[in-house]
Amino acid sequence: MDTHTYKPASVFALVALLGLAACGDTLGEQALLGGAAGGGAAVAAGGDPLTGAAVGAAANVAYCQTYPERC
C-alpha cells in the first residue's frame, strides 16, 4: 500500500497561501497581511522571502480591491 507523506513546509505554504483570503479592512492592512502570508509561504517553500512578501502583498491588495465584498 502506497501512503503519501507531506512535508511540514509544504503544508505551511498551502495554509499561508490560503491566508491571503483574510484580506484586511484598509489598503495598508491588505498589503501587510498579504506580505506576511507571501513571505511566510516563500520561507516555508525555500524561496526568497522578500519576493514572496512583494508578490503576496500585491496579490492580496489586488484581490481585495477587485472583490471588496469577499474581504
Image (cartoon, helix red, strand yellow):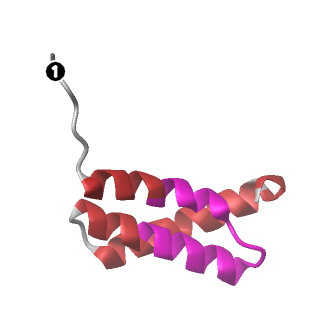
Query: 48 left or right of 63?
Result: left
Residue name at image x 55 percent, y 62 percent: 59
Check disc 1: other Cα within 10 Å, few if <14, some if 14-19, many if 20+. few
Query: 34 left or right of 7?
Result: right
The quadrant in which residue 38 appears is bottom left
Residue annotated with mark 1: 2
- Tell which residue pokes out farthest to the top in this image: 1
- Tell which residue pokes out farthest to the left in this image: 1
Position of 57 relative to 20 (above/below): below
Q: Magenta stretch: residue 18 in it?
A: yes
Q: Position of residue 2 (x, y in %)?
A: 16, 21
> In this view of the protein, which residue sits in the foreground, 66 or 38?
38
Position of 30 relative to 22 (above/below): below
Instruction: Name the kind of residue labelled 1 in the image.
Output: Asp
- Tell which residue pokes out farthest to the bottom in this image: 28
Q: Position of residue 5 (x, y in %)?
A: 22, 38
Residue name at image x 15 percent, y 16 percent: 1
The quadrant in which residue 40 appears is bottom left
| Residues drawn in magenta | 16-38
Residue name at image x 71 percent, y 61 percent: 64
SS label for mark 1: loop
Residue name at image x 54 percent, y 68 percent: 58
Chief SS of the magenta region: helix
How many tags in the picture?
Answer: 1
The quarter of the rendered structure image containing the C terminus is bottom right
- Tell which residue pokes out farthest to the front in this image: 1
